[in-house]
């Protein structure tokens, strides 16, 4: 079954896979953050992903007005999200230049938007878990918007 | 000088006689009558188990404590009945909550315990054989590992140095910084192992870096040491780890930096929340912290010794050709700018927005980059 990107179904499928793979995510440890994923394009989207303990407990699409409630948002154009996910699908994990850290570190390719440095630091405190959540797309059939 | 207690229990005849009496069944049982009011402690979230914060009840809660601990000089845990007789004085000199406490410290402790990892098994060492790394890149990477191993040594020593100065009622902070000691020891381990695993080994240690790091240990108070190490030093090192993941030659090093990054970010968060707590509850310390940071920020630039900068430039540009060097200078300049920006943001969040105006960091950083660029062209 193909999952459209971006869509709620896509992120919920990654959440379902995370919650089904308890051993991997328990090993990585507690992860408590509400992060945003903003996909820029002709039809922009902002998704809120809630991580609690070892699970992704909630995925929803929200309006810009609620972005302040998020710890941080990863913001990138559709083409970059696509390149990242295609890299994950190709190698089973992202190529070095397509990890969440590499994409968001230098060059403004993927922007990290935040109000509070404490929220911003959660991206790094939980990096391995968040990367593993996205790596769940490795064998997903994706239909691009 | 060694410490000798006033009692030698092994030769105390009264005590020996009493023990013999007890063994005959003549018990006093007075301590049974001291049983406290019962408390109800349950895990709020079964997935997390019984957390430190679940035990913040009644006389055991940190908020049940006076701001200054005056009655406990020994090892009595918070909420226990203090021992009868003379309690040994273990000399805790951090007895005010503002000396050590941080918002959410219980959560950081739980997170640290939950997210521990193992250098031997969680880094994919076997995959190193899959990748070819050019020799100059490998040597530069080992130079980076050498500095990072030095840095992490001090980050182990600082919390270890201050732990026994903290009153035992502040168990959560002592527990958290114990996890930090373990984290930092693991970081030294991982950088050492990586340098050796590639066959090149460790390279030049730096007197300049070590002078900078010594300043962390020489802080007069825990808060000064904490703000220097957790907020300033580890904030900078967190960005250095992010950059190192960014320029890692293979997925093995990337994994290594993802893992150390997580620990480092947690330490930064604790430091930020301690500084914020201190500024909120004891703003009279503002001038002292500011004066200390004026010096600490100058000292910190010692971390950027010439071998280190050059190694980062080679790694950032992925080689030593003029074009690679130019690219490397851009990468290093960009991440150094980010280090400073994020440091000022954290200071502002913690209640010290004035750091941006009084900090020598910006000017020094501009000078260093200008010199580097001049040398490269």
Image (spheres, coloured by chain):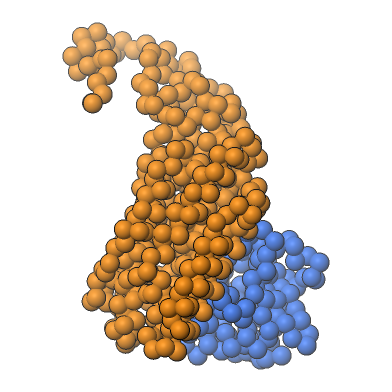
Chain colours: A blue, B orange
Question: Is residue A12 in view from this perspective?
Answer: no
Furthest residue in direction left, as rendered: B11
- Give left or right: position of A115 versus B233: right
Q: In which quarter of the image is the C terminus of chain B?
A: bottom left
Q: Position of residue A89 (x, y in %)?
A: 53, 88
Q: Quadrant of the N terminus of chain B?
A: top left
Which of these two is toward me, B199 or A34?
B199
Which of these two is toward me, B239 or A27?
B239
Q: Is residue B37 above or below residue B235?
A: above
Which of these two is toward me, A120 or B153?
B153
Q: Position of residue B15 (x, y in %)?
A: 25, 12
- The quadrant where residue A80 appears: bottom right
Which of these two is toward me, B51 or B97?
B97
Residue depicted at x 71% and y 90%: A145
Q: Where is residue B333 in the image (x, y as percent from the top left)?
A: 52, 73
Image label count: 0
Residue depicted at x 47% and y 40%: B222
Residue depicted at x 57% and y 68%: B338
Q: In this view, does B242 lie above or below B135?
A: above
Q: Where is residue B318 in the image (x, y as percent from the top left)?
A: 41, 84
- Give left or right: position of B147 versus B226: left
Question: Is residue B146 in view from this perspective?
Answer: yes
Residue depicted at x 57% and y 84%: A84
- The quadrant where residue B161 appears: top left
- The quadrant where residue A140 appears: bottom right
């Amino acid at each position: 079954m193909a999952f459209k990107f971006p869509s709620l179904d896509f992120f919920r499928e990654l959440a379902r896979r995370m919650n089904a793979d308890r051993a991997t995510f328990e090993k990585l440890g507690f992860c408590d953050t509400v992060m945003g994923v903003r996909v820029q394009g002709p039809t922009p989207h902002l998704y809120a992903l809630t991580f609690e303990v070892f699970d992704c407990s909630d995925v929803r699409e929200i309006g810009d007005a609620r972005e302040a409630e998020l710890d941080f948002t990863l913001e990138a154009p559709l083409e970059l999200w696509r390149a990242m996910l295609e890299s994950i699908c190709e190698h089973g994990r992202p190529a070095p230049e397509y990890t969440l850290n590499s994409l968001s570190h230098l060059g403004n390719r993927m922007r990290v938007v935040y109000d509070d440095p404490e929220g911003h630091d959660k991206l790094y405190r939980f990096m391995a878990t968040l990367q593993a959540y996205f790596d769940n797309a490795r064998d997903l059939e994706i239909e691009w918007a | 000088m060694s410490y000798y207690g006033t009692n030698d229990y092994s030769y105390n005849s009264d005590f020996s006689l009493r023990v013999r009496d007890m063994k005959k069944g003549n018990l006093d049982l007075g301590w049974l009558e001291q049983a406290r009011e019962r408390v109800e402690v349950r895990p709020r979230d079964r997935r997390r188990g019984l957390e430190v914060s679940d035990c913040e009840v009644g006389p055991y809660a940190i908020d049940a404590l006076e701001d200054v601990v005056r009655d406990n000089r020994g090892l009595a845990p918070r909420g226990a009945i203090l021992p009868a007789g003379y309690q040994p004085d273990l000399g805790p000199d951090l007895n005010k909550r503002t000396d050590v406490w941080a918002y959410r410290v219980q959560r950081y402790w739980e997170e640290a315990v939950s997210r521990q990892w193992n250098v031997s098994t969680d880094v994919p060492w076997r995959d190193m054989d899959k990748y070819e790394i050019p020799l100059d890149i490998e040597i530069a990477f080992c130079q980076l590992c050498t500095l990072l191993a030095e840095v992490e040594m001090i980050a182990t020593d600082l919390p270890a140095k201050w732990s026994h100065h903290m009153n035992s009622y502040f168990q959560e902070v002592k527990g958290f910084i114990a996890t930090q000691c373990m984290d930092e020891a693991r970081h030294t381990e991982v950088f050492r192992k990586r340098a050796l695993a590639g066959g090149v080994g460790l390279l030049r240690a730096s007197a300049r870096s070590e002078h900078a790091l010594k300043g962390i240990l020489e802080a007069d108070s825990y808060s000064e040491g904490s703000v220097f190490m957790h907020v300033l030093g580890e904030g900078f090192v967190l960005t250095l780890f992010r950059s190192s993941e960014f320029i890692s030659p293979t997925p093995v090093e990337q994994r290594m930096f993802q893992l150390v990054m997580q620990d480092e970010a947690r330490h930064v968060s604790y430091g930020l929340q301690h500084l914020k707590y201190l500024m909120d509850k004891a703003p009279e310390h503002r001038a002292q912290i500011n004066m200390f940071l004026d010096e600490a920020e100058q000292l910190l630039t010692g971390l950027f010794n010439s071998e280190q900068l050059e190694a980062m430039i080679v790694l950032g540009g992925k080689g030593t050709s003029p074009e690679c060097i130019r690219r490397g200078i851009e990468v290093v300049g960009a991440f150094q700018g980010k280090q400073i920006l994020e440091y000022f943001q954290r200071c502002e969040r913690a209640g010290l927005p004035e750091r941006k105006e009084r900090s020598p960091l910006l000017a020094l950083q501009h000078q260093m980059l200008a010199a580097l660029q001049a040398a490269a062209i």
